Amino acid sequence: MNTLQKVIQYIYLFIAVFFIYESVRWWNEDNGKAIMLLVFAALAVGMYFFKKHFRNKMMNKNR
């Protein structure tokens, strides 16, 4: 279970990198879509840190 949580945590970083890449690709064609993708990338990075914080908190609680 702990390994699955760690993998999911890093999937959020992969999603953020993908959204940043897509944002750069769309920047000259549609600024609105590019900005929306940057917001989603920021949310994915936030979710990474949120998951990391609470996973560490639960691991320390179980010790």
Image (spheres, helix red, strand yellow):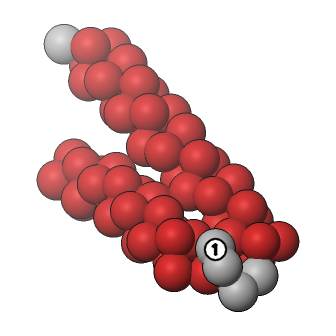
Give how far across and how far down residue 61 sits, in percent.
33, 14
Closest to the observer: 60 or 29? 29
Residue type, numbered disc 1 = Trp
Give how far across and how far down residue 60 sits, in percent.
26, 14
Q: Is residue 57 above or below residue 12?
A: above
In the image, what residue occupies the spot 64% across and 73% down? 27
Residue 32 as seen in the image, left or right of residue 9: right
Closest to the observer: 24 or 53? 24
The extreme front residue here reads 28
SS of the residue under disc 1:
loop
Q: Quadrant of residue 10?
A: bottom left
Q: Quadrant of residue 16?
A: bottom left
Q: Is residue 50 above or below residue 58?
A: below
Residue 2 as seen in the image, left or right of residue 37: left
Q: Which residue is mark 1?
A: 27
User: Mark 1 Cα within 10 Å, few/some/many (few <14, many 20+)?
Assistant: few
In the image, what residue occupies the spot 62% across and 49% down? 43
Quadrant placement of the N terminus: bottom left
Q: Quadrant of residue 39?
A: bottom right
Give how far across and how far down residue 63 sits, in percent.
19, 13
Count of picture labels: 1
In the image, what residue occupies the spot 38% across and 62% down? 17
Residue 17 as seen in the image, left or right of residue 32: left
Give how far across and how far down residue 57 sits, in percent.
37, 19
Q: Is residue 10 visible?
A: yes
